[in-house]
Amino acid sequence: MQNKITKILEHMAHSHEQMARILDAERHVAVRMAQIVHDLPDAEPEFGGSAGVIESAGQVNKNIIAYLNAFADLQEALAEQVGRVIKELNGQEEE
């Protein structure tokens, strides 16, 4: 039984590593977009007027929100899986 739990933990660790890599890539995109927005001129930008600037800022905000939601989902998945493992280990100790 201990061997099965070890295998499950190995698979969970691998899937968490892959999720972390995806989130890291999304983070890099969000950081780069924030840098681009920061580099925009403050006076009279040529992005289709104020409506274009507002739309672009909305897209940046949307990407940041998506990143934060993905990070929250990762934390929730980690907590759920660790909880299951702890329950399983507690069940073994009682036996």
Image (cartoon, helix red, strand yellow):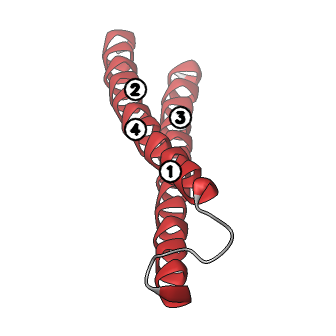
The quarter holding residue 93 reads: top right
- The kind of secondary structure element at disc 2 is helix
Q: Is 39 above or below relative to 66?
A: above
* Type of amino acid at the residue the image marks with label 2: Glu
Kindly report which numbered mark, 3 or 1, lies closer to the viewer in this rendering: 1
Kindly report which numbered mark, 2 or 1, lies closer to the viewer in this rendering: 1
Mark 3 or mark 4, earlier in chain: 4
Which residue carries the number 1 mark? 30
Which residue carries the number 2 mark? 17
- The kind of secondary structure element at disc 1 is helix
Q: Residues within 10 Å of mark 4 (few under 14, many from 20)?
A: few
Which residue carries the number 3 mark? 82
Distance Cα–Cα, label 3 vs label 4: 24 Å
* Type of amino acid at the residue the image marks with label 1: Ala
Which residue carries the number 4 mark? 25
- The kind of secondary structure element at disc 3 is helix
CB-based contact (under 8 Å), mark 4 and mark 1: no
Distance Cα–Cα, label 3 vs label 1: 29 Å
In the rendering, at what x and y percent does residue 61 appear?
55, 68
* Type of amino acid at the residue the image marks with label 4: Ala
Q: Residues within 10 Å of mark 1 (few under 14, many from 20)?
A: many
